Amino acid sequence: MSGPQTAQFPYRHTQIGYPMFGGMAVGTFTQARALVRDKRAGRPRWWWHVPGWLTFAALMLAFSRLTVQVDETRISVGFGGGLARRRVELHTIEAASAVKIPWLAGWGIRLTPQGWLYNAWGRDAVRLRFAGGRRFTIGTDEPEALLAAIARAREIRAAA
């Protein structure tokens, strides 16, 4: 096979959430402008803006990258440097399918009517279904490659 159906194994892919960078730029600009305005006005507490500014920038940076890894035993999904991570054991998955996420579902970590969603941006995703009907959706810009990696990992696990 060639093209997007073929996935390197073990699979690792990082998706960049470009809209997060846009939001970060607007928010950072707004905070910096308020900080400069207060300092010029001689307000004694202008430095109170700094912790909020740094917290905002850190959260935006942390949630702007979603990394998905698939190996022989599990799928790991995490934002940033592992700040918010979820691991799913392969043997617990009943089915995996490519889906389109409604645009209202948003970005980041969300609890939707279809279960938990981890999404950096975009509408393409892979939905995992577990025993008991639980679902977990992983936003990705290459759903076919992720599905191929999951199928390959399940084959390896079944053969072992």
Image (cartoon, rainbow, N blue to C red):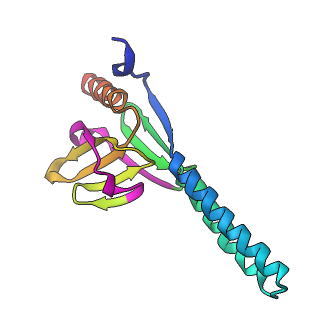
Q: Is residue 4 visible?
A: yes
Residue 91 falls inside the magenta stretch:
yes
Q: Residue at x 27, y 59 (%)?
A: 112
Farthest-out residue, left? 132
- Expressed as whole percent of the image width and height from the top left, the position of residue 25 reads 63, 56
| Figure label count | 0
- Quarter of the image for the C terminus: give it: top left
The answer to whether 137 is drawn above or below residue 26 in the figure is: above
The answer to whether 147 is drawn above or below residue 19 in the figure is: above
Q: Residue at x 82, y 84 (%)?
A: 41
- Is 46 on the left or on the right of 21, as rendered? right
Residue 122 falls inside the magenta stretch:
no
The answer to whether 6 is drawn above or below residue 22 in the figure is: above
- Is 103 on the left or on the right of 14, as rendered? left
- Expressed as whole percent of the image width and height from the top left, the position of residue 70 reads 40, 34
Q: Is residue 65 visible?
A: no
- Quarter of the image for the N terminus: give it: top left
**Between residues 8 and 26, which one lies in front from this camera angle?**
26
Q: Residue at x 25, y 40 (%)?
A: 99
What's the magenta bit mostly, secondary-structure-wise? strand
- Is 76 on the left or on the right of 1, as rendered? right
> Residues in magenta?
84-109
Q: Residue at x 35, y 45 (%)?
A: 138
